[in-house]
Image: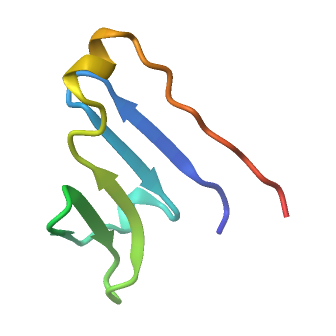
Amino acid sequence: MDKLRVYFDREGNTLTVWFDDPKKEVICEETADDVVLMKDRRGRVIGFERLNYLSAKQRADGMRIPVEVQMA
């Protein structure tokens, strides 16, 4: 993995995480838990998107999104 990309869309209320180049996406598969898996041509998961990431109250309160980064 070259780099991890994390995007929060406040208006769309989604959190998107890419493990690989987003241009490699060929199919998306929504799971039952408001999670969309983005896959490459081989069917490998290269990213995911969490729909309805923050509740209306959290958005109204201006909640910060905690992120922890660990380097191996």
Q: Nearer the viewer, residue 64 or 18?
A: 64
Q: Residue furthest front?
A: 57
Quadrant, the N terminus: bottom right
In the figure, residue 41 lies in which quadrant?
bottom left
Figure check: 20 above or below 17: below
Q: Residue at x 38, y 68 (%)?
A: 24
* Residue 23 locus on image (x, y percent): 37, 60
Q: How many marks?
A: 0
Figure check: 50 above or below 15: below
Q: Residue at x 19, y 55 (%)?
A: 34
Q: Residue at x 30, y 32 (%)?
A: 54
Left or right of residue 13, residue 61 in this image = right
Figure check: 60 above or below 47: above
Q: Nearer the viewer, residue 22 or 30?
A: 30
Q: Residue furthest right?
A: 72
Q: Residue at x 65, y 56 (%)?
A: 3
* Residue 71 locus on image (x, y percent): 83, 56
Left or right of residue 12, residue 2 in this image = right
Q: Nearer the viewer, residue 8 or 59?
A: 59
* Residue 57 locus on image (x, y percent): 25, 18
Quadrant, the C terminus: bottom right
Q: Residue furthest top?
A: 61
